[in-house]
Amino acid sequence: MRIRSTKRGFIVSCVLVLSLSACSQQASSASPAIPSTTAVTVPDPTVTPTESETSPAPSATPELQPTSAITPTSPDEPVTITRPGEPLAPLPAGTELILVDIWMQDALHGWASGGSLQEPMHVLRTEDGGLTWQDVTPPEPVDGDPQYVSVVAHFLDSLQGWVTFQHAPGPQGFVTPVVWRTTDGGASWTASEALDVSGYMGFYGPSRIGFSDPDHGWLMLDLDSAMMHRYIAIYTSQDGGATWNRVVDPQVDAPIQTGDKTGLVMDSTGQGLLTRDLHGLVEGVSVEMTRDGGYTWESVPLDVPGDVGAAQLCAAHSPHMFTPTSWAVGVSCLIFNETAGEDGDIWQEGEAYLFITEDAGGEWSRWDAPGGLLLYLPGDVILSLGRDIHRSDDGGNTWTYLKTVSWDAAFSFISPEIGWAAARAEDERALVGTVDGGRTWQEMEPRIR
């Protein structure tokens, strides 16, 4: 299979149309490389419009609500902040797309971030399974180089979504972040009040966002790194993203600031899970839990066999909350080896585990698991996504090997069988899809319609 290069054009070898409706799930692999794949026969793309398709079509230039002069949420900063720059112009029809992330909602409808070589970060929406896309980017002012703008997004369905942007500083400094919300499939966007970033002296940028329902959401900002810490701030919203309250402040919340943050999930009751990669800074591995909306966090050790520290590095990842009491967390370990592997690395892939609690974190059971990021689907199906793709049909008790690929990817599955991947291998990119759970992948040619 050939894939799109970020340095040169490419020729499309095949097109895939997917046709099954279910819940959407999305994940980004830690390390998957684009193989030749067996062709998959797929049905003709003729479909009957669904209820979602009767919604207003996204306009070419989304409506700005409100203007780019935004009042900050902090009462200590009563001045008006003017957000410098101009919104990105919509990508023209026919533009060949490079997708960075993808969030499919059913067989036809979905969202993506991506764009062209010159402007790689637009917000896109499809109504034909990923063959063609419409540029529905919110009117976010861009003051610096658009090549250094990134998108952080969450979508509940084909109509509702939240988007925020991370910028490199422009001529007038950092752009104060806001969160954009749409309820009509990107036809219009409404900006939140500006996030309170008072006290942040250096870099800041949104890294993760999620909503458990149309009202309750959370947002993580990455801040400066120093002294083996990766500082973050966490905000929560209870009004659909219109306003955001800072609940974790790096200046006073030291315990969870150590290490890289690998995952965050919260629910509408105020419970949440935060996972970290501590890179051996402390012994053991843990998951951080909150029960008060993120104001306080409790570190709960996870029982990993062997000594975690100098000779074994373990990172928690892939937190998930099935119900208010049933949760899951993945753990992947690296083992020190004095003899370097073929890649020259002395740290080799070790054991991996799935931890599950049925009593809101009181007790955790441990299951052996493959080493990839975990994607949880309905019906006790879990996918392990990395260079090796595995599947469990019994909630992680047993696993079946499916495929080895040679690309990293952001994955999105709407069912155990139907999925997409925004794949990358060095300087090349491709959108690929599967109709057999990841055993085979077919390449697509995404374009602006």
Image (tube, rainbow, N blue to C red):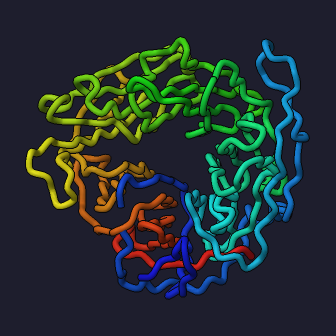
Q: Residue at x 19, y 28 (%)?
A: 309
Q: Give whichever of 166, 42 is nearer the camera.
A: 166
For this orientation, the residue located farthest to the front is: 171
Q: Give whichever of 84, 401 is nearer the camera.
A: 84
Tell whether 449 sits left or right of 103: right
Q: Residue at x 53, y 27 (%)?
A: 232
Q: Quadrant of residue 29?
A: bottom left
Q: Residue at x 26, y 30 (%)?
A: 280
Visible in this render: residue 273? no
Q: Is residue 315 above or below residue 443?
A: above
Q: In what quadrant of the picture does the N terminus appear? A: bottom left
Q: Please state the horizontal and vertical placement of residue 259, each as a whole percent of the image.
A: 39, 29
Q: Give whichever of 209, 31 is nearer the camera.
A: 31
Visible in this render: residue 372? yes
Q: Give whichever of 81, 137 is nearer the camera.
A: 81
Tell whether 187 sits left or right of 157: right
Q: Please state the horizontal and vertical placement of residue 275, each as a whole percent of the image.
A: 40, 32
